Image (cartoon, helix red, strand yellow):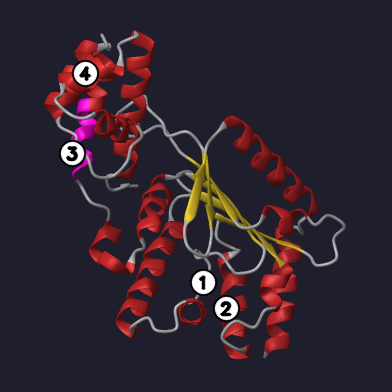
Amino acid sequence: MAAGSTVPRRLIGRTLKQLREQSGVPAVQAYKLIDVSAQTLWRIETGQPGPKIRELDVGALCQLYDADEDTRAALLGLVAETKSPGWWHNYGSAVPNYFDLYLGMEEAACKLTTLHPNLLPGLLQTPSYRRAVIWAAIPGMPTVEVEQRIEISAKRQQRLTEDPADFSVTMYICESALRWAVGGPAVMAEQLRHIATVSKLPTASIRLVPMGIATPLPLIVGTFTLMEFPVYTGTRLTEPALVYVEGFTGALYLDKPEEMDQYRAACKTLRATALSEQETRQLVLSIAEEYE
């Protein structure tokens, strides 16, 4: 999958920083070489949007750091891809700034593991459910922008139809998310039957965490998505796994080893406590009948 400029930019930055640190070259020597400020070098090395990444600069830094030819070639090949916007950039302001990065990472990921205690994951939301969520969060949003966000959700969901060798997602959903009548009974009935259908796709494993289990872990951990990535096409480089945590007004991206360990441990607990895929499908359809 194409990832717009997000992953290539991050791979270039991370690799250049590693090369600089391994070579022992001071940062001041690096940013003076390519005639940028210390702040701009930091933004490049951390994969931030904004700074223009040029082949000439990357080549010069690779020479300064005494990078091997394969690494140099891989980085120069990635520079062109930083100039290719992702499909979601066509939607302009309909994509919040914090979510722009997420869409690029989701597009590049080969595996997602996600927990949703209260609302259903975007990869599962029907247009009616999504519309109800948007208007609850931002009542004054223009209809045109609402419909653009629904289009974005539909495009994201196309990943569920990919080859499972290229993409898969495990979704842990608390039963309480199914009991909350977002948009009303008719919307929820349609939504739950859609979940049952998606649960049969080879790319999607959907498992409910039932109400009444002994551990309150899902309530403590909250909504998160653990993202894992393949080796980037044509290179030996890969984006390390990270965790995305979305809040009401923004988001966090966590990638420190101790943070990853905690979330992987949470995933292990969820696997042990959630219903099986078949049990989940049966309960989802049962609740759908209640709404009907």
Q: In the image, which is nearer the foreground, mark 4 or mark 1?
A: 4
- Above or below residue 81? Residue 119 is below
Give the overall secondary structure of the magenta segment.
Answer: helix
Label 1 environment density (alpha carbons within 10 Å; few <14, some 14–19, many ≥20): many
Label 4: which residue? Answer: 61
- Name the spot of residue 224 as percent of width and height, x first: 58, 53
- Name the spot of residue 265 as percent of width and height, x first: 71, 40
Which amino acid type corresponds to the residue marked 1 in the rendered image? Answer: Gln
Label 2: which residue? Answer: 191
Which element is circle 2 on? helix
Label 1: which residue? Answer: 125
Q: Are marks 1 and 2 in contact (CB under 8 Å)?
A: yes
Please state which of residues 10 and 41 is positioned toward the viewer in this rendering: 41
Q: Are marks 4 and 3 in contact (CB under 8 Å)?
A: no
What is the span of residues highlighted in magenta in the rendered image? 76-83
Q: Residue at x 39, y 84 (%)?
A: 140
Which amino acid type corresponds to the residue marked 4 in the rendered image? Answer: Leu
The disc at residue 52 is: 3
Which element is circle 4 on? helix
